[in-house]
Image: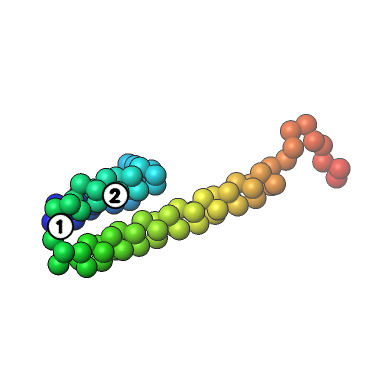
Amino acid sequence: MEAYKRATKRVVNSFLRREISFPECIHALDAALAKSITRLKADELPELRAWMLTNNGIVMKEMQQREAARKDNFKARLIAKRKRPTPGAHSTK
């Protein structure tokens, strides 16, 4: 269980540092689970589930923040584009 925790912690931290993409993160988390699950004892399964849910919560929260930032950035670019004068356009004043 400790090896799984260490592996997934590295994966999640890499994702938070934007070193890996969302699909790469999910793939790495799945791979860590596949590697570890056969070695776990039945009494470790509740802890495994809790750890998986914690990781999922962290990754989903980060994805929500990235999506909000993406939308904010899009809106800011759209507003800036609207404020820019059209090249070659003359003022009617």
Residue 44 rendering spot, x and y as whole percentages: 16, 64
Residue at 82% in and 37% down:
90
**Image quadrant where residue 23 sits:** top left
Q: Residue furthest right?
A: 92
Q: In the image, is 89 to the left or to the right of 42?
A: right
Say which residue label 1 marks: 40
Tell me if I can see residue 80 in this picture.
yes
Say which residue label 2 marks: 29
Mark earlier in primary sequence (1, 2) = 2
**Image quadrant where residue 20 sits:** top left
Residue nearest the viewer, comparing 27 with 6: 27
Q: Residue furthest top?
A: 88
Residue at 51% in and 50% down:
70
Label count reads: 2
Residue at 80% in and 36% down:
89
Q: In terms of secondary structure, where does tag 1 sit?
A: loop
Residue nearest the viewer, comparing 17 with 84: 17
Residues packed near mark 1 inside 10 Å, few (<14), some (14 to 19) or many (20 plus): few
Q: In the image, is 79 to the left or to the right of 42?
A: right
Task: Give, as a three-letter code, the residue at label 2.
Answer: Leu
Task: Give, as a three-letter code, the residue at label 1.
Answer: Leu
